[in-house]
Amino acid sequence: MDPIVIVGTGLAGYTTAREFRRHDNETPLVIVSADDGTSYSKPMLSTAMARGKSPADLAQASATEMAAQYQADVRTHTRVTAIDGQQRTVALADGSELRAAAIVLAVGAEQMDPGLGGDGADDVFAVNDLSTYSALRGELTHAERVVIIGGGLIGCEFANDWARSGYHVTIIEPQQRPLGRMLPELAGNTLAAALQSEGITLATGRFAERVERADGAFIVHDDQGTTYPADVVVRAIGLQPRTELARAAGIEVGRGIATDRHLQTGAAGIYALGDCAEVDGLVLPFIMPINQCARALGATLAGTPTAVEYPVMPVIVKTASCPVQLYSPSPSIAGEWQEEALKGGTRSLFHDTEGRLRGFALTGSAVREKGELAKAVPGYFDNRSP
C-alpha cells in the first residue's frame, strides 16, 4: 500500500498527521523533514526570553517521539528535490524516490530578503525555526544592542520580548508606524507609544540599506543616512511562501501554492496547507487557519472529502506592553476605519460603504470586546468583495 507522504514537520505537517490518524490507523504515513523534525510551538519563539524559556524548553517532542505517536516513518535531515504530479512521486536528495497515495506540501514560508548590502549582511539573522532561534539566543548572551529590520507582527513581538529582557532594541520600519499594513492610525500609534515606553527606539519611515561590520559589532545604515550600532541584527520583514517544489511540478502558484477549499492543488492527489498555501485566494499564515485546514485535510485523506471552513479568527499580536487583536478586512473592500480612544486602549472598526462591519482592531483594554465583535463580522471566505 502506497503511503501518504507529508513534506514538512512544522505545525501544518504534524497537525495533518495527527488529524489523519484520528480517522485512519492503517495506511502507511511518511513524514519528510529537512531538519531534525523536533516538534515545537513556533509562536513561542517571540515570547520565550521574557518568560525565561530557553530554546531547549520550547522543544515539545523529538522526531522519534512524533513517529511513535503518529505511527509514521519520520525521515529527518532529508531534502525533497522534486515532486511529480502525474506519477505522484517524491524525489529525495539521496536519489531515492517515494511513490505516494497522496502528497501533502506543508513546507512553510521563509523570511523575505530585503537585499541588504555591506560586509555584515550575511550575519543578519532571519529567525524562522527553532534551530536558527537557538543560534540567535547564543549570540544574544553576549549582546546589549539589537536592531530589528521590520516592524510587522514578528518584529514587534521580538522587540517587546527582548526589551523586557534588558536589551536596547531599535526597529527600522518603512511604514510610518509599527504594524503599518495591519493597523489603522490610532491603533498603530497606540502600539508605537507602548513599545517606546519599553525603551524601544522606533525608526519609522525608513529602509535599512546595508549592514557593515565594525569592531566585532555592526553598523546598520538606513536610506536617510542614519546609522544604528548593533551587537545583533535581525530581519523580520515578512514571509514568502515556499512554492518552488510546486512550481517546478507545474502546479499553479499565486501568492502561495494555489488550492481549493479541499486543500487540493491543480494536481490530483497533491495537497498544500499552512504558510506555503493560498487557499481559495487567501494566504493566512497563522495558527488557527492552519488547524482548521489540518482538520479538514485529515478527513479528506482518510476518504471523507471535507472542505475547510474559516470562521472569524482574529489575529493575536503578542506584545505584552500593548495587547492587540485584529480582524483585517480584505483590501478589496471599500470603506473606512472609525477609531476611538478608550481608557487603557483603542477600538477601531472598519465599515464598508454600506455601513456593514467588516473588520476591527483592538488594543489594550479593548481586546476584551473581541468575542462580541467576532460575532458581528463575516467569516474569511465571505469577507471579500464579490
Image: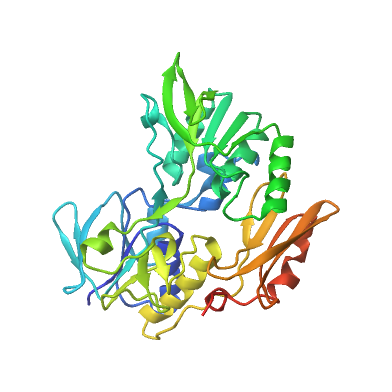
Who's the residue at 34% across and 56% down the image? 242
- Quarter of the view holding residue 85: bottom left
From this viewpoint, is residue 47 visible? no
Please state the horizontal and vertical placement of residue 10, each as a whole percent of the image: 42, 57
Q: How is the image coloured?
A: rainbow
Please state the horizontal and vertical placement of residue 38, each as a whole percent of the image: 42, 51
- Quarter of the view holding residue 252: bottom left
Extreme-left residue of the structure: 95
Q: How many marks?
A: 0
Closer-to-camera residue (16/325): 325
Extreme-bottom residue of the structure: 304
Closer-to-camera residue (251/334): 334
Up the image or down, 196 lies above or below 65; here it is above
Who's the residue at 51% across and 25% down the image? 225
Please state the horizontal and vertical placement of residue 42, each as a whole percent of the image: 51, 51
From this viewpoint, is residue 54 visible? yes
- Quarter of the view holding residue 333: bottom right
Who's the residue at 46% across and 64% down the image? 283
Please state the horizontal and vertical placement of residue 200, each as a whole percent of the image: 66, 33
Who's the residue at 21% across and 61% down the image? 248
Location of the N terminus (image quadrant)? bottom left
Extreme-right residue of the structure: 343
Closer-to-camera residue (332/160): 332
Extreme-top residue of the structure: 215
- Left or right relative to 264: residue 204: right
Up the image or down, 261 lies above or below 276; here it is below
